[in-house]
Image (cartoon, helix red, strand yellow):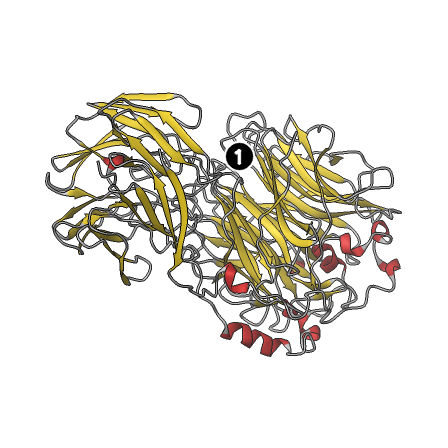
Amino acid sequence: MKIRLSMLTMLGAVFLAASVGGFAQQPSQPDSTPIRTKSPLSDRSRLPQALQKVPLEHLSSGALMLLDRDGDLVEWPAASAAPATGLGPSLETATAAATAVALDPRVGANVRLGNDPIVLPPTLRAQAEPHIARALNNPNLLLATFQEGRFTTAGAVDCGFSVSRNGGLSWSRALIPGLTQTSGGPYFRATDPVAAVNAGGLLYLCTLAAGEVNFATGVVLVGRSIDSGATFAAPRVAYRAPNNTVFPDKNWIAINTFPGTPTFRRIVVTFTLFASGSTAEGAPIARTYSDDGGFTWSAATFIHPANTNAQGSQPVFLPNGKLAVVYWNFGSAMSPGERLEVVVSNNGGVTFGAPIRIANAIEYNPPNIRSGAFLPSATADRINGNNLYVVYQASFAGVPRILFTKSTNAGTTWTAPVAISDNIANTAVFNPAIATSSDGHTLSVAFYDKRANPGPNALVDMFLALSADGGVKWQPNIRLTSVSSNAALAPLTAQGYMLGDYLGIAAPTTPNVRAVPVWIDTRTGNPDPFSAQARVWRSPPTSDFDGDGKTDISVFRNGTWYVLKSSNNALMAVMFGTSSDKIAPADYDGDGKTDFAVFRNGVWYISQSSNGRLRAVNFGGTGDLPVPGDFDGDGKSDIAIFRPSTGYWFYIQSSNGAGAALQFGINGDVPLLGDFDGDSKADLAVFRPATAFWYYRRSRDGALRSVHFGANSDIPVPGDYDGDSLSDIAVFRPSTGFWYRLNSSNGAFMAAQWGVNGDKPVPGDYDNDGKTDLAIYRGATWYVKRSANNSYLIKDFGLGTDVHVPAAYLRQ
């Protein structure tokens, strides 16, 4: 076995305005330069007694809006916008709009979540603090909620919601009915909205409201819709402060959506409860719960000792029914130092164990912008019973970063925090929100970021961090917003302009469902809720015909496809093609399922699984080899061929219909399919049997790589064997049944025997763990070694003369 690595020349540099590399410049002036300030509140005696000594920077943005009187806590855009910067916000907004950028193909259009309610005066339309939830039983149903602008100079702040029934492509919008007096309710103001959906698809909205005219008594409310958001019942009281000596703040909601657990359908609401006389940075977290759909609620009790100095709670149910609550602890004289902590309840929130330290943290507050520095974001997947994922903003090695940590044992121990934002030094990042796929492999983190506009201004963008291996490795951040937003158009507080303490992201539930982040955007001239679809799930295996993320055992015989569906072990037989066709299975329509497809003398025939549509495309010629792959990164396989006689690749980008022709290889080379640089795009790659050299061109930067690996008679079997989202260089040696590979994650050389002389390789992800499994067929029998648990799958299926679909692009 020979192994040698070398770097070849760069083919050229391409500037992408939406890429991370496009922002490598250092700011001429630091972000910390003030652009405008607001005087702090001078007379605190008018505040509720519980808050008169509490640092206002550790109250939620919603609480400030709830307590504001005539602009003494929050100065609204109509009054504050004009002198915001040297440019002025109108010019700044126009400048941002003029510099709209093309986004990564994985990111969909930026979509406004409906028009402002007509009751909002044109000069007072500012939204903040968006959140979103997705229905598990109908992934197209999304519920978003957000703070709405105030109505008159001293009038109420309300909360609104938007519903999408097509996965975020379009939205309908309204005020939450029965909440404030503006929308037919009894309350004077409302804020801090959070969305949730139960297992049956009922929609819930949790808000904080002012219970009397002086805004001194807080009420935590929960309302629900039983008709997918067409109507909402009047909200019910989950907690009401008895008087102004206590004040609830920063509420959050979680629902147990795991059937079979003792507290299935339980709703838990947590909130910070400030008390009279407190001079601490925070206060203890309390909880209340409902087991009847939100009609009645338990008494509120603390989740940890009553002297805890906390804020920003995040309740999360685990698949085993446990409830974890993550929060920020500011520390105390007896236990100094800021940190993240978690408490875990084994009975769904009735009682809790002792607090567990997640990580020490240095609070980071972005200059000129008020953010949720004390509010982490937490989630859990639906498969692994004890996995918890947490992100937060902090100063990390002196640099603002979004940090990630993970627990695999229900919060008992945690990984060391790692930075997942690749922003340039001294540029602000804030308000992260995390979502996970059901299996915990795909993690998506959305956050605000100033890297595109460094220096003393209020222009921000949204970025996305992605991991396809449960947080072990993170891909380069991608930009979500095509236009920068001017935070100077948002309300101004003593801590800066206020977009809110949080944002939200709806998790992808299956490979064909896209993540949907929501944020506050000012491209319309005032702060508005916006969203976008983002393809975050890894591409499906070559033969995943049922869309469950697992390779299906399947064969092609004389024009008929036979598939043993891994989701239910059912046999599917489909006549599509002729005996002389070259099979070309791939996901051409981006629905997360492999489509039946054949290549016949220069004509492609494709049966799209999403709609049953038959496509016929003339592309290529006799002697060409089909090599479909996602070369443009839009989540759909592109029609592509390799011409062995010349080494040319030809493909049609599905994102825009543009064609491409590139020479990469020579006569005799074997074309390969793989993503060797982890950017979710197929790279041009070949194996040269005469020399046993691998050559590939990284789509990320155009760099060429050559690797001497294998022998002349080996079969190249590239795949992601180590689960890091990059294709590994690997070969199968038919004479011995040995597999050899180089792990892309650490460069380690691996050798394993799985097979004997004469076996044929059929690698794939048969267990949906994100790793390629060793697999061979021998006659009519398949032998698979599952990487998830090293168990074996042995199955008689097909004939020895069949074309084995998982090996469609292996040149054997």
Q: Position of residue 249 (x, y in %)?
A: 73, 48
Residue at 22% in and 50% down: 613
At label 1, the amino acid type is Thr
**Depth order, front residue of 4/150:** 4
Residue at 84% in and 47% down: 280
Q: Position of residue 575 (x, y in %)?
A: 15, 38
Residue 623 visible? The answer is yes
Residue at 62% in and 61% down: 148
Residue at mark 1: 257
- Residue 331, picture quadrant: top right
Relative to residue 214, is residue 576 depicted above or below? above
Q: Determine whether, in the image, residue 20 is placed left or right of residue 634.
A: right
Crowd around label 1: few <14 · some 14–19 · many ≥20 (10 Å): many
Q: Determine whether, in the image, residue 132 is placed left or right of residue 760.
A: right
**Depth order, front residue of 183/328:** 328
Relative to residue 51, is residue 472 depicted above or below? above
Q: Quadrant of the N terminus?
A: top left
Relative to residue 632, is residue 289 depicted above or below? above
Q: Position of residue 623 (x, y in %)?
A: 13, 49
- Residue 311, picture quadrant: top right
